[in-house]
Image (cartoon, rainbow, N blue to C red):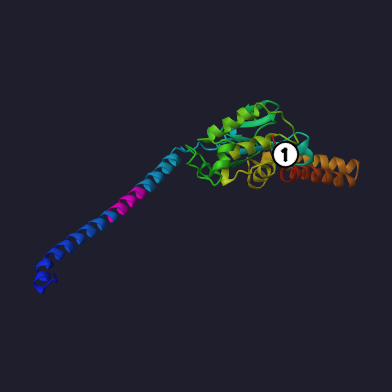
Amino acid sequence: MTPTPTTHLLLLPHFLHSALQLSFVLCFFHLFLQSGNTFTMELNASYDIEHSHSIQRIQHELWPLDPIDPKKAKFPCCLVWNPLPVVSWLAPFIGHVGICREDGVVLDFSGSYLVNVDEFAFGSVARYLQLDRGECCFPPNLSAHTCKHGYQHSEYGTAITWDDALQSSLRYFENKTHNLFTCNCHSFVANCLNRLCYGGSMSWNMVNVGALILFKGQWVDFMSIVRSFLPFVVVVCLGVFMVGWPFLLGLLSFSILLIGWFLLGTYLVRNLLEC
């Protein structure tokens, strides 16, 4: 039977009704997708806000430090240095290094199986450098590293506070044999800084720890300068007087050999100076 115009007119309302229903379905589906995207954006925004707040809470836990007080030997969160007997008389740029807790107490690796606490070896502090705890990485969990070395840092050993890192290094070096040329006080400080991932670096070693305190450290007072350089000046004067100018050449050779040894063991033969 061939459809007539009258039949088309009768079917037109049904087509319009079906088209209207389809448009309603499409509009509803579009609104559903928009609401899903909005919900996802809200979740991401809330996560970012919560993450920001958690970082701020960690930062707020870094309570203010007490002022540095050389008279009481308190150097909160500082690297500290003093001259070594005999060695510093010949090479004044080399000395004994320690690192301080948040309460200012000095820790230093001064002998085999011995880490001094609040008893800095070889005399009082001559130079110090206060470090910024904000440059450290204190991850509360494995996914909350603020440094770029998350896996390496976790494998090396992390800490949730400054003092926690120092305590971990203290326990580690209480089982180590001290050696001036391979495992010494600089090794202990470097271990602490690597646990802190200080400055975003996991490459702290004897050389850059020594360079840090040498070039950026502050003298405690004028007498600290005298105490550090006077023996060297006396040795040079006596050597030149008794031996002559070749003594200076020998002293220079000694310094070059010493520096070369630490550079060689640190950057070329990696396992040579590892504790």
Of residues 30 and 196, the one nearer the viewer is 30
Q: Mark 1 sits on what residue? A: 271
Q: At x 55% / y 41%, what residue is drawn? A: 151
The residue positioned farthest toward the front in the image shown: 1
Task: Determine crowd level at label 1: few under 14, some 14-19, many 20+ residues with C-alpha closer than 10 A.
Answer: few
Quarter where residue 265 is shown:
top right
Pick the residue in front: 153 or 117.
153
Magenta residue check for 36: yes
Residue 72, can we see it? Answer: no
Q: Quadrant of the N terminus?
A: bottom left
Residue at x 74% of width, y 32% of height? 179
Segment colored magenta: 34-45
Q: Residue 32: where, in percent of width, then height?
A: 26, 54
Residue 148 seen anywhere in this rendered image of the structure: yes
Where residue 198 appears, x then y in whole percent?
57, 43
Helix, strand or loop at label 1? It is loop
Between 81 and 182, the one lying in front of the other is 182
Q: Position of residue 26 (x, y in %)?
A: 24, 59
